[in-house]
Amino acid sequence: MITKQQFTDAVLFEIGIIKHLFTKIPANGFDYKPTEKQRTTTELLQYLAGTGAASVKAIHASDKNVYMEERKKTDSITPDQFLAAMDQQAEIIKQVMNEMTDEELAMPLDLWGMGTAYPKSLVLLQMVLESFVAYKMQLFLYIKSSGNTEINTSNLWQGRDGSM
């Protein structure tokens, strides 16, 4: 069982890695799109810039509509605004997590109406931490595919240059 602080620290670590990966996007890589039906790198950045904060707010409010409204707020950010947006998201996540009590984290939640409720703590793990881990991998692959073949697993898992 991890603590609320350990969860928050893990999320902030992932945000740091995502910010590091952002610095590795080739200048021509922001419009990269692996296939027609996938996001561009810029669209992926817009999603990453808001999904964590939107998720914690929605889980705290027990309202999926909060997620939908909050997520839209980063749909128009530019690459130049990305790092500041990630910093703002980190602050929101820290604030909301600080507001949540252990009792609230134990409360069952079926945010998407799927018929099964899980403790809010588990929903947070799945919607925030797991999403950042998955989408940072997608960003890493976009960066490699758009021309930066120098990055490696140290960039992806540790958020730093070098070899493992």
Image: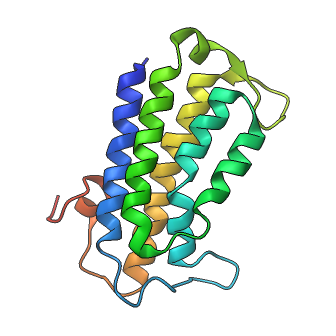
Q: Nearer the viewer, residue 74 or 8?
A: 74
The quarter of the rendered structure image containing the C terminus is bottom left
The quarter of the rendered structure image containing the N terminus is top left
Q: Which residue ends up furthest to the bottom in the rendered image?
A: 28
Q: Is residue 36 toward the left or the right of residue 22 in the image?
A: right
Image point 51% across, 85% down: which residue? Answer: 32
Image point 51% across, 75% down: which residue? Answer: 42
Q: Which residue ends up furthest to the left in the rendered image?
A: 162
Please provide percent x and percent y for residue 27.
Answer: 35, 87
Image point 73% across, 50% down: which residue? Answer: 68
Q: Nearer the viewer, residue 94 or 36?
A: 94
Vertically, is 112 above or below 41? above
The quarter of the picture where residue 74 lies is bottom right
Please provide percent x and percent y for residue 77.
Answer: 52, 69
Total labels drawn: 0
Vertically, is 112 above or below 18? above
Q: Is residue 150 toward the left or the right of residue 82 in the image?
A: left
Image point 51% across, 86% down: which residue? Answer: 31
Please provide percent x and percent y for residue 7.
Answer: 41, 29
Check the image and tell me how it is coloured.
Answer: rainbow
Q: Which residue ends up furthest to the top in the rendered image?
A: 103
Q: Is residue 94 toward the left or the right of residue 164 in the image?
A: right
Vertically, is 135 above or below 26? above
Vertically, is 5 above or below 128? above
Please provide percent x and percent y for residue 115.
Answer: 85, 29
The quarter of the picture where residue 83 lies is bottom left
Q: Is residue 24 toward the left or the right of residue 42 in the image?
A: left
